[in-house]
Image: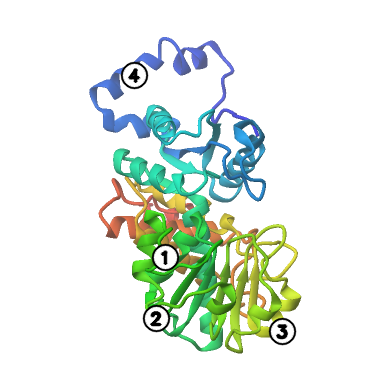
C-alpha cells in the first residue's frame, strides 16, 4: 500500500496552493462553516480500519503488531473493490474504554470506522457505544459483513429450493460476533426466531441456562421457542439449514439428522465445520468461506460497497435497512447465473460493489440518515447534464 497524490505538486504555485499560504484559506473556510469539512478534505472517502488484535482470523489473540498485515489487506480490498481509502490502525490496548476513547479521539480524521478482529463480547459494547456517540458510520465487519453475505446466500439458496425464509428451521453453530449478527439479521429478514437454534461451546442456547452472557440471554429470549436442549446433534435434528461460524468440527452423524435436501454453510477457515464432501451427502446446497470451493461466503462482497454507499451520501450511521439492502443487492447480482454452485457472486465480480453501494445509499436516504443525495454515477452523467 501507499499514499499518493490526486493532483500534481510540480511547481512553486502548486506548493503554495497545497500548503502555505493557500491552505490557510481552506482552514478558515472550515472554521467558519464546519459542514465544508468533508468537501474540502479527504475524510469524505477515508475509513479507519481499527483492531486491537484480539481475534484475528483463525489466529486468535495475536496482538496489534501481528494483526497489522490483516488490516493492511483489508485496506487493499477497500480500495480495490470500493474505491475507498482507508488507514489500518492497530491499537495497543484491549480495554473497552481505552478503545472507545482512542477511536473517538481520532474520528475527526475519518468518514467512517470499520472495526475488525475484536473479540466478543467486548466487540458488541464497543460498536454500540461508538455508533451512538459518533456521527459517522461505525461497522464491525466480523459481525455485520458476515451476516450480510450469509443472508444474501440464504435468500438465493431458498429461492433455488422453492422455499420461503419464514419456513426454514435454522441452526447456527457459534455464538460469537458473527453468530450473533447472523441470527439478528436472519430474523430481521423474515426467518422466524421460533425456528432458530443457536449453539455455543456449551450446547444449545435456551432460556433456562444459567450461564448466559447478556447478549446470549437476549438471543435465548428471541429464538428456540420449543426450548430444545442438548448439543449440536440435538439441535440439527430436522433442521433445514446449518450455518457454521464456530470453527469447531461437527460430526457427520450429527449432520445426518438434518432434514433432507437442505442447506449447509460451513464458513470456518481454513477448515470448515463440515467438509463439503460430507455436506453434499446430506444437503442440496453447500457453501464455505474458502475460495477453492464453490459458493464462497466472503465479507469482501459486502464491506467495500456498504462503505462506498454510506460515504457517498455522508451517512451518519449504518442502519438495519442498509444492511438488508446490501444483502439483497448481492443476491440479485447472480440472478441470471443462479445455480447450486453459484448462490453468491465471485468476490472478483466487478458488478457487486457498485450494486451494493447504490442500494445502501438509497436505503440511507429512505431511513433519513443521509446528509446528501448520492452522486450520479459517471456512466449516467452525460444523460443528466445539460448539453
How crowded pointer 3 is (Cα within 10 Å; few <14, some 14-19, many 20+) is rated as: few
How crowded pointer 4 is (Cα within 10 Å; few <14, some 14-19, many 20+) is rated as: some
Q: For the residues marked 2 and 3, what is the alpha-carbon distance in whole angstroms? A: 28 Å
Q: For the residues marked 4 and 1, what is the alpha-carbon distance in whole angstroms? A: 58 Å
Residue 101: x %, y % from top left: 38, 30
Seen as rendered, the residue at the extreme front is 210
Residue identified by numbered label 3: 281
Residue 138: x %, y % from top left: 40, 44
- Residue 226 image label: 2
Residue identified by numbered label 1: 209
Q: Is residue 242 visible?
A: yes
User: Which residue is drawn at the image coordinates 49% and 54% (left, top)?
Assistant: 177
- Secondary structure under badge 4? helix
Residue identified by numbered label 4: 27
- Secondary structure under badge 3? helix
Tag 2 near tag 1, CB within 8 Å: no
User: Which residue is drawn at the image coordinates 43% and 70% (left, top)?
Assistant: 186
User: Which residue is drawn at the image coordinates 42% and 32% (left, top)?
Assistant: 103
Mark 4 or mark 1, earlier in chain: 4
Q: For the residues marked 1 and 3, what is the alpha-carbon distance in whole angstroms? A: 33 Å
Amino acid at each position: 500500500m501507499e499514499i499518493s497524490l490526486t493532483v500534481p505538486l510540480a511547481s512553486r504555485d502548486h506548493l503554495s496552493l497545497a500548503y502555505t499560504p493557500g491552505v490557510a484559506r481552506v482552514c478558515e473556510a472550515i472554521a467558519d462553516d464546519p459542514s465544508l469539512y468533508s468537501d474540502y478534505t479527504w475524510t469524505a472517502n477515508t475509513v479507519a480500519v481499527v483492531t486491537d488484535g484480539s481475534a484475528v482470523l483463525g489466529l486468535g489473540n495475536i496482538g496489534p503488531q501481528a494483526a497489522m498485515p490483516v488490516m493492511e489487506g483489508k485496506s487493499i480490498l477497500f480500495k480495490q473493490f470500493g474505491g475507498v481509502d482507508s488507514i489500518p490502525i492497530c491499537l495497543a490496548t484491549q480495554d473497552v474504554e481505552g478503545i472507545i476513547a482512542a477511536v473517538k479521539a481520532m474520528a475527526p480524521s475519518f468518514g467512517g470506522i470499520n472495526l475488525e478482529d475484536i473479540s466478543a463480547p467486548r466487540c458488541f459494547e464497543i460498536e454500540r457505544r461508538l455508533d451512538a456517540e459518533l456521527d459517522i458510520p461505525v461497522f464491525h465487519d466480523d459481525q455485520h459483513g458476515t451476516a450480510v453475505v450469509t443472508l444474501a446466500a440464504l435468500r438465493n439458496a431458498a429461492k433455488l429450493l422453492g422455499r420461503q425464509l419464514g419456513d426454514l428451521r435454522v441452526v447456527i453453530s457459534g455464538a460469537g460476533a458473527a453468530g450473533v449478527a447472523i441470527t439478528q439479521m436472519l430474523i430481521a429478514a423474515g426467518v422466524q426466531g421460533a425456528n432458530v437454534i443457536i449453539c455455543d461451546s456449551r450446547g444449545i442456547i435456551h432460556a433456562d441456562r444459567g450461564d448466559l452472557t447478556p447478549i446470549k440471554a437476549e438471543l435465548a429470549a428471541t429464538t428456540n421457542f420449543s426450548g430444545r436442549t442438548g448439543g449440536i446433534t440435538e439441535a440439527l435434528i430436522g433442521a433445514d439449514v446449518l450455518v457454521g461460524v464456530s470453527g469447531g468440527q461437527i460430526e457427520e452423524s450429527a449432520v445426518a439428522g438434518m432434514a433432507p435436501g437442505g442447506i449447509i454453510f460451513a464458513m470456518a477457515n481454513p477448515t470448515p465445520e463440515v467438509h463439503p464432501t460430507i455436506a453434499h451427502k446430506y444437503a442440496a446446497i453447500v457453501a464455505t468461506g474458502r475460495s477453492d470451493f464453490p459458493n464462497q461466503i466472503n465479507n469482501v462482497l459486502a464491506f467495500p460497497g456498504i462503505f462506498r454507499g454510506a460515504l457517498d451520501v455522508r451517512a451518519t450511521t449504518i442502519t438495519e435497512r442498509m444492511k438488508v439492502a446490501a444483502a439483497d443487492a448481492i443476491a440479485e447480482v447472480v440472478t441470471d447465473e443462479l445455480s447450486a454452485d453459484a448462490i453468491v457472486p465471485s468476490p472478483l465480480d466487478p458488478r457487486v460493489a457498485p450494486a451494493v453501494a447504490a442500494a445502501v445509499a438509497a436505503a440511507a436516504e429512505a431511513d433519513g440518515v443521509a446528509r446528501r443525495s448520492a452522486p450520479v454515477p459517471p456512466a449516467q452523467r452525460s444523460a443528466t447534464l445539460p448539453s
